Image: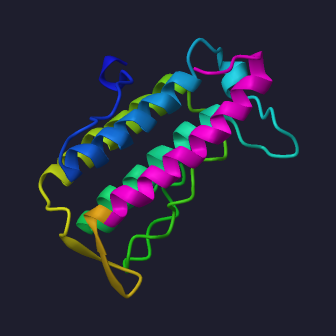
């Protein structure tokens, strides 16, 4: 997963490079939280009563990447990855964006591959747009800048969840 090596976001860069750098930092942090664990550990809901797992977080964030950078940003009509029969509502692509938490027979490797494919497509879609470019969303317009900031919050929150889960699974902290 060399593509997701965690590097410090730029300290003195333009806005786009800073936003993209922080998003990539959090993406890499999430993958690091899953490192050196077996399939059972990745599927272990370690913070009761929650059913949240590290594998579920990877699946969920693949769905979130797909929702914001494909459905919302580009208007692409594409079904969810982990509930393909759910479809989208055709309006703003919002349906299915919270999916992925429920575990299926998907292996960790396959989940990471799906997530990496979504990240790669997200980068392509972002590179083709200005930060002030807008897309329809919930009866209004949303900018790419807003989507970046939303995604930073999404990843930061879920990396915090991953911290707690990982510590409960094997006692590892600070990865």
User: Residue lying furthest right in this view?
Assistant: 49
Q: How many numbered discs, if any?
A: 0
Give yes or no for residue 124 being in the magenta stretch.
no
Quadrant that contains the N terminus = top left
Give yes or no for residue 156 being in the magenta stretch.
yes
Quadrant that contains the C terminus = top right
Asked whether the viewer can see residue 79, the reply is no
Task: Locate residue 169, reporting x and y percent.
Answer: 76, 22
- Residue 139, placed above or below residue 19: below
Identify the magenta region: 146-175
- Nearer to me, 106 or 94: 94
- Nearer to me, 94 or 21: 21
Task: Locate residue 71, reporting x and y percent.
Answer: 33, 64
Q: Main secondary structure of the magenta part?
A: helix
Residue at the image point whose x is 70% and y is 17% from the top: 172
- Residue 153, placed above or below residue 43: below
Tell me which corner region of the image, top left, top right, bottom left or bottom right, holds residue 25. Answer: top left
Tell me which corner region of the image, top left, top right, bottom left or bottom right, holds residue 88. Answer: bottom left
Task: Locate residue 104, reporting x and y percent.
Answer: 64, 39
Asked whether the viewer can see residue 47, the reply is yes
Q: Is residue 168 left or right of residue 34?
A: right
Residue at the image point whose x is 57% and y is 38% from the top: 159
Residue at the image point whose x is 43% and y is 29% from the top: 28
User: Residue lying furthest bottom in this view?
Assistant: 139
Task: Locate residue 31, reporting x and y percent.
Answer: 49, 27
- Residue 155, placed above or below residue 136: above
Q: Is residue 45 left or right of residue 100?
A: right
Residue at the image point whose x is 72% and y is 32% from the top: 165
């Amino acid at each position: 997963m060399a593509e997701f090596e965690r590097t410090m976001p730029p300290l003195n860069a333009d806005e786009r490079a800073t936003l993209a750098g922080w998003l990539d930092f959090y993406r890499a942090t999430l993958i690091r939280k899953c490192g050196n664990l077996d399939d059972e550990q990745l599927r272990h809901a370690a913070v009761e009563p929650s059913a949240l797992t590290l594998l579920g977080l990877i699946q969920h964030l693949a769905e979130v990447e797909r929702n914001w950078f494909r459905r919302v940003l580009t208007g692409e009509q594409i079904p969810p990855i982990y509930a393909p029969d759910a479809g989208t509502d055709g309006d703003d692509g919002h349906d299915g964006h919270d999916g992925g938490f429920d575990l299926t027979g998907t292996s960790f490797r396959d989940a990471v591959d799906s997530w990496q494919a979504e990240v790669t497509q997200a980068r392509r879609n972002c590179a083709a747009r200005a930060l002030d470019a807008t897309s329809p969303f919930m009866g209004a317009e949303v900018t790419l800048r807003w989507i970046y900031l939303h995604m930073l919050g999404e990843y930061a929150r879920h990396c915090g969840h991953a911290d707690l889960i990982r510590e409960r699974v094997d006692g590892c902290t600070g990865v």
